[in-house]
Image: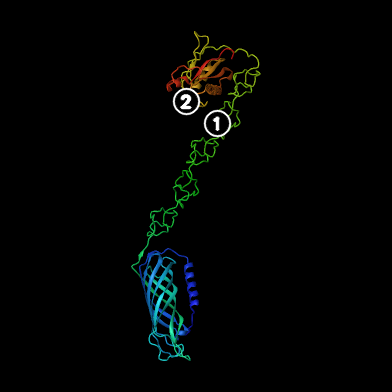
Amino acid sequence: MRTYRLSPRRAAWVVCGVCLGLLAARPAAAQRKYLVEVGVAPLYTSYDGLTDLGGSIGGLARLGVWLPARFEIEGEGSYSKPKTKSASIGVGVTTISGSVLYNIPLGRTSFAHARVGIGSTSYGTCPAVSVTGSGPCGSTSGLIAGGGLRFGLSPTLFVRADGVISHSSAKVSALTSTGGDSTVGFSNFGVSLGVGLMLGSRRIVDSDKDGVLDSKDKCPDTPPGALVDRNGCPTDSDKDGVYDGLDRCPGTQAGVRVDGNGCPVDSDKDGVPDGVDRCPDTPAGAAVDADGCPRDSDKDGVPDGIDRCPDTPAGAAVDQLGCPGDADGDGVLDGLDRCPNTPPGTRVNAFGCPLGESGQQPQIKPNIDSARGPTGRPTPKLPSPTGPGAPQPIVLTGVGFAPGSARLTPQSRPVLDSVAKALLASPNQHVEIAVHTDQAGAPVALQHLSQLRAEAVRRYLISRQVPFQWLTAKGYGGAEPVTSDTTSAGKAQNRRVEIRPAPTGQ
């Protein structure tokens, strides 16, 4: 039987290699909590050559207590009866040891382990023949180290394999010229293969299936699919309220509103998500800035993207598509044209006014048509300069504009449709569209706004087939109030659109 001497340095290298191999093994989550382990196994021990003992088979028993963090304290006792090689005398060898084990899960019911500890070995009665290498006498103590594997036959029953190296020192009888004993160090190696039974173990569960066992899970109700931290709590990298793993848009900008999938919501479809969009009601198709607000490069009130004429000169009156008009065809745009009803062919200056005197327009004739317009409204009777007394302008009740703009409200259209029908029923009748504002603002700005509004009404009537030569647009600002009342009701009364006879010479 093969025996050999293993030096302390070589034994240390072997133990370190075993421990590194076990620690490099890929750990897996254990599914049970273990409390007490009992086990038995046959044992083969190979003794150091200095012991004068041959290898032998014996048996061992062990008892272990599992601690938190995968540690275990284990006590072990073994017995074998090897024979001396020099005299073939049997020597009973008893070893008792205590070790600390670190267990590494390799699956649900399998483990690797590394161990260190101390042990005491009793070699029984000394051999009768005292010769060099006759073996140790009495008891020795030393360090032990090793490792092993457990393979689960069931959640509580294991097949266990171990390898252990023990290093001790003892006095050995030696015949020398002077006689006496000497102290030497030696190492023994043992392997065992047996069974272990876990007592008092219980199953560890992961109720929310997040990979963190309930015993360590601080958030036991994690939704399925959510990623969790080491404590079992869901993570939310972009802080949008939708957990990682469930978030289909994981890089959402801070402050953006998201849907149930964690993706940004963009109600007005302008490319700027809700939550950071400062203008959430942008019209469809409008170009916006980084804040989600429409851009209006030419400042005509029609946003870029919708504006088909993006280079409109400042002050020009535009339609809903942002394009300026030139109703009298004199080459000066409406809104900039100070004489908007120049007869065709008349040479004008830069302000749209004739260079010479213009001819007189025909006199307005009374309109007494009372036919009903397309919406059932009575068609207004247009003012006549030939009636008794001074002609009174007609206030077009219901015609209004969006605040601060020259954009007609939808409610204005039926009223203006009736006006158009009345004008068409009395051909060659020339009227002035007079628009008034309240007095809340700078006079110049109010006059300009009222002029733009008058042009808007004129363009609408022209779109209803009224000849443009019949219509003059004039804005009066707040210069002609009908009441001095400064309350909201009084201001509303001063804001009005009138139809009146065109002044002679226009």
**Helix, strand or loop status at disc 1:** loop
x and y percentages locating residue 192 in the rendered image: 42, 77
Residue 411 disc label: 2
x and y percentages locating residue 35 in the rendered image: 35, 67
Residue 307 shown left or right of residue 79 in the figure: right
Mark 2 → mark 1, Cα distance in angstroms: 20 Å
Residue 414 disc label: none
Q: Amino acid at mark 2?
A: Gln
Q: Which of these two is toward me, 101 or 220? A: 101
Crowding near pointer 2: few (<14 within 10 Å), some, many (20+)? few
**Helix, strand or loop status at disc 2:** loop
Q: Which of these two is toward me, 359 or 105? A: 105
Q: Amino acid at mark 1?
A: Val
Q: Picture quarter containing residue 116?
A: bottom left
- Please tell me whether residue 263 is drawn above or below residue 446 in the rendered image: below
Which residue is outermost to the front?
178
Q: Which residue is mark 1?
A: 302
Looking at the rendered image, the disc whose residue lies closer to the viewer, 2 or 1, is 1
Which residue is outermost to the left?
200
x and y percentages locating residue 433 in the rendered image: 53, 18
Which residue is outermost to the top?
388
